[in-house]
Amino acid sequence: MYSHDVLIIGAGLAGMRAALSARQNGADVAVISKVHPVRSHSNAAQGGINAALEHAGDDWHDHAYDTVKGSDYLGDQDAIEVMCREAGSEVIQMEHYGVTFSRDENGRLGTRAFGGQGKARTFFVADFTGQALLHVLYEQIMRAGVRVYEEWFVLEILVEDGECAGAVVMEIRSGDIHVIRAKAVIMAAGGLGRVFEPSTNALICTGDGMGLAYRVGAPLMDMEMVQYHPTTLKGSGVLITEGARGEGAHLLNSEGDRFMERYAPNMMELASRDVVSRAEQTEINEGRGIDGSVLLDLRHLGEPLIRERLTQILDIARDFANVNLLEEPVPIRPGMHYQMGGVKTDVDGQTPIPGLYAAGEVACVSVHGGNRLGANSLLDTLVFGRRSGEHAAELAKSKSHKDLDDSAADAEKAHVQRLMENPKSEDMFGQIRVDMGTTMNDHLAVYRNQAGMESALDTVRQLRERYQSVYVPDKGKTWNTNLVFTLELGFMLDCAEAITLSAIERKESRGAHTREDFPERDDENWLRHILVRQTEDGPALDYQSVVVTQWEPQVRSY
């Protein structure tokens, strides 16, 4: 058995920022990750990180207002104020740790414009900002002596006497199952993008963290709010950064028109993501698309700027779409990108289960509400990762480990054994996963309606039944990726059901949740969060009021 003060599940930006702050506050800290830390999906964040720096003539109140408006007024304003107020110091701290942010002609930190914001306040490292931040944080946790359980898989969160006490984990290399005791556990396992197909997310983004917390009674909040990014490559779903539009790229339809002028005349291509995605989908649905897509045109930006600031997407377009961005536009369409909802927490990362924290995309503070502004996600991971680590370290000083032994893992050992013994059948994880992903993309994408969502719910529940007899062909213990993928699928089905139930329940259109049968926002009845809890009788829905501090809901336009 292993023991640590603070155990962090997930080694992306939220997890490593939490680990560093907990270690700096005196805790014995360990990070567990199913991949090497620098393979975490934070790598894929391209465009930048938002902050309002006073010396640049910006004000965090303006950033907060843009975030509240972007959320379609579903974001909790007290949490948004915390994030935006602490943004500047967090960006400066990351620069001090060694992140080589791009700079302007005067040598100061450079910014680019991003959607839904009144000022250019997005700091960036070309178009691979997430990768730069991730590698620097990995260096910092290595320097601080944080233990990393690399390529281990978490099977269960342990709760004893109503408090989080650790986790049951599997070493993927050997297949051995262990217990790790912890005085506090921080869930930082990232998003659930692969519940949808296609998605911009890595194949590892399977909702494990949300599923783990959900199964021990933590509520999931705002799960219906699934962000479709406006610019993903047609076919593959690979992300083309919003930084392209931030640098001035145009969106064109089949007639060569910059159609955003009809939908957001003031902000054009830099309206909020939900607005741009709906505009694109409307153009496609009404016959002004090109084989199910529209075009992103960068040619007028010129080769020097593209090669300096957008080098990664220049390679992506060439490698995945056979398009040279210097000479021709690239076909793009809205694609599943980010989950605004997640495990409900407060601004210190605390869930309703004592000792269990969450931070990053797995969590819902809620700072993104119905629509996340681009470049607020990296900020969310760093601010609330740090705050969670600090709070968990303080909690660990005041308590002792629960009296656990290896028998705490018996139930998970039996569960794994049962899966391995399922008889051969046509149902393997791959087919169930594809059926789930295409169903969610068909019925819970940019536009939704009652009949489609009810159909999706029926399908997800049928898939859950099929999952009970899923066949795992590899019977070995060493590097059994068949087993890992099958375990991931169980968490994905939990997440798919929570998303669908919440979406059916919200009978209005707000942010990313656009219903054809309820096209208007309804503040009187739906200015509130939807929570999903797992009970003995199945999922149960509950509600919580949105926190409004200084910005009353208004008509939202760009």
Image: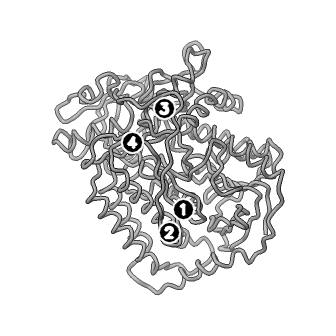
In the picture shown, does residue 391 fall above or below 479? above
Disc sitting over residue 229 in the figure? 4
Front-lying residue, 28 or 12: 28
Amino acid at pointer 3 = Thr
Q: Badge 2 is on which residue?
A: 490
Q: Is residue 64 visible to us here?
A: yes
Residue at the spot x=41%, y=76% of the render?
465
Q: Give coordinates of residue 116: x percent, y percent.
A: 42, 29
* The C terminus sits in image quarter: top left
Q: Which residue is mark 1?
A: 211
Q: CA distance from mark 3 to mark 1?
A: 27 Å
Q: Residue type at mark 2: give it.
A: Gly
Marks 1 and 2 sit apart, C-alpha to C-alpha, by 8 Å
Disc 2 and disc 3 in contact, CB within 8 angstroms: no
Residue occupying image coordinates x 68% and y 40%:
386
- 316 sits to left or right of 519: right
**SS at mark 2?**
helix
Three-letter code for the amino acid on which mark 1 is drawn: Gly
Q: Are marks 1 and 2 in contact (CB under 8 Å)?
A: yes
Location of the N terminus (image quadrant): bottom right
Label at residue 504: none
Instruction: From the top left corner, tell me how far across and down residue 414 is, in percent.
Output: 62, 81
Q: Secondary structure at mark 3?
A: helix
| Label whose residue precedes the other's in the sequence (2 or 3) | 3
